[in-house]
Amino acid sequence: METMVLNKEEIKAFIAETSFTDPKEIKDDTMLFEEGIFDSMGLLNLLSFLEENYGVQTDDTDLVEENFQNLKAIEDYVARKKG
């Protein structure tokens, strides 16, 4: 369980760095697309990051907003893909 917290912090740091957003503004339930933090290019970068760092292979069917709308959704998605 501890590794998931670490993963979420790494993912949060990646999102903050690539979107030039203060990490303190990104909460577990912050709506990344609705609040303009992420766009389609940001999503592509995130998918590459998840593949390189966690071995997560994203299928076309995974590309739905529900999987990537906030940190909690991304954490759940990675857990499902790795489980």
Image: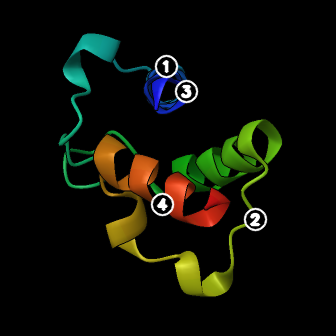
Q: Residues within 10 Å of mark 2 (few under 14, many from 20)?
A: some
Q: What is the distance, in whole Å, between disc 2 and disc 4 at their CAs? A: 11 Å
Q: Which residue is mark 3?
A: 3
Q: What kind of residue is marked 4?
A: Tyr
In the picture, measured across the screen, residue 30 lies left or right of residue 4, that is left
Horizontal side of 52 relative to 34 (left or right) equals: right
Callout 1: SS? helix
Asked if the residue at tag 4 contacts the one at tag 2, i.e. Cβ–Cβ closer than 8 Å, the answer is no
Closer to the N terminus: mark 2 or mark 3? 3
What amino acid is found at the position of numbered circle 2 in the picture? Gln
CA–CA distance in space, label 2 to label 3: 19 Å
Amino acid carrying label 3: it is: Thr
Seen as rendered, the residue at the extreme bottom is 61
User: Residue at 54% across / 23% down in the picture?
Assistant: 10
Mark 4 element type:
helix
For label 2, the residue is 57
Q: In the rendered image, which residue does mark 4 sit on?
A: 77
Mark toward the start of the polypeptide (2 vs 4)? 2
Task: Compute the Cα span from label 3 to label 1.
Answer: 15 Å
Where is 74 relative to 52, above or below? below
Tag nearer the camera, 2 or 3: 3
Mark closer to the chain start, 3 or 4: 3
Query: Mark 1 highlights which residue?
Result: 13
As drawn, the residue found furthest toward the front would be: 1
